[in-house]
Image (tube, rainbow, N blue to C red):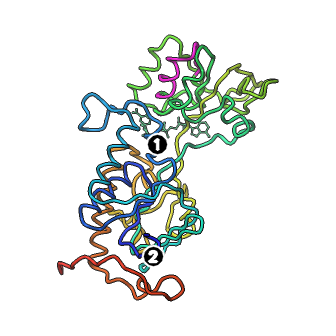
Amino acid sequence: MTDNRVENLIVLGGGPAGYTAALYAARANLEPLVIEGFAWGGQLQNTTDVENYPGYPEGIMGPEMMNEFRAQAERFGTRFVTDDADRVELGDGGIQRVFIGDREYAARSIILAMGAEPRRLGIPGEMELAGRGVSTCGVCDGAFFKGAKVAVIGGGDSAMEDAIFISKYADDLDVVHRREEFRASKIMLDRARDQDNISFKTPFVAEEFLAGDDGKLRAVRLRHADGGEPEELEVGGAFVAIGHIPRSELVAEQVRVDDEGYVVTDGRSTRTNLAGVFAVGDLVDRTYRQAVTAAGTGCMSALDAEWYLRDTPPSPEAHWQRGGEPVEVAPQLASTGE
Ligand code: NAP
């Protein structure tokens, strides 16, 4: 059982970055342990066709691609814990610890790959009506709104992607955005504009989600960005698609993060300010946020971890875990003396 052993490497997170890190680490004989989360697969688990990942000229479904990433990491000896971490104790060098309930996992290095989650508007009704008409995942929930009138809130590619997808089911869809200009790419915006049942309502700010007598979403209260009287947009469904925030809450007090909570890495590397702690993917990247870029940083982190482990002898602490009892320590890689 892994919790009586100090691992070489724990990868925390099971998305494209985490699985790629595990693949490279496993091929480097680091025997990585991936704590992948209960809902492993990351944001691609909530995507349909992925058409922009090289190597799949016909596209591939997001969940299927994540299965393949995981299987490839497993083929080379990666082990998985399919559960959510409750607590993390990062060390500056020494031992890195992850806790799940009363289980403790320890390692000499850790790759943080927890990704990002949907940003919320923070308006009344948003949480109360979540799952009762308000959603942050068009691909997951769009099909529930067959024949309905729906609003998608946001002006980036996510909002356009959701709108295009949901318009296959909804009769009538409004994209509500707070500015006249869109952050979305031209191609996505044009595709949304080409749909007969998609309209644009700009510049409008969503102020509240209103429930009907049945306790489900009835309308969104909007106000023109320049002020004036509020108006109600009657809808059966509303999708909030306003970007993402990094899932750094377990580590933000311990490792250096920026003002938005993204973990800060050193130059072009995946090293954080703590020795033996590396960070990758959407947890770090506010700019590119693509599966392929996340996978690329996953690869980089495995190499960074491999070099760190090669050049850093296990601390005495690594041999004396669990109240002073000696434990097994994963064998150190041979130093090449570079
Ligand atoms: P994004 O590009 O950051 O856009 C977020 C949108 O939400 C912006 O229009 C922003 O408005 C709006 N917004 C943010 N906070 C808001 C608030 N509190 N109230 C109202 N509106 C708010 O995020 P994204 O659309 O999730 O895209 C993220 C990245 O993923 C981008 O690089 C994108 O290209 C990529 N992506 C690509 C695809 C694709 O190509 N298939 C699909 C999805 C995402 P302002 O513009 O006014 O700030």
**Pointer 1 with pointer 2, Cβ within 8 A:** no
Q: Which residues are magenta?
A: 161-174
Residue 130 location, x and y as percent?
67, 36
Q: How many marks?
A: 2
User: Mark 2: which amino acid?
Assistant: Asn
Q: Residues within 10 Å of mark 1 (few under 14, many from 20)?
A: many
- Quadrant of the image containing the C terminus: bottom left
Q: State which tag comes first along the sequence, 1 or 2.
A: 2
Residue 17 location, x and y as percent?
37, 52
As drawn, the label of residue 43 is 1
Judging depth in this view, the residue of 336 and 179 nearest the camera is 336
Residue 313 location, x and y as percent?
32, 83
- Quadrant of the image containing the N terminus: bottom left
Kindly identify which residue carries mark 2: 4
Identified at 54% across, 86% down, the residue is 323
Pick out the residue farthest to the front.
Answer: 1
Q: Is residue 53 above or below residue 186?
A: below
Identified at 32% across, 48% down, the residue is 71
| Closer to the eye: label 1 or 2 | 2
Residue 115 located within the stretch drawn in magenta = no
Identified at 69% across, 37% down, the residue is 126
Q: Is residue 72 left or right of residue 272?
A: left
The answer for how far apart the CA atoms under marks 1 and 2 are is 32 Å
As drawn, the label of residue 250 is none
Residue 164 located within the stretch drawn in magenta = yes
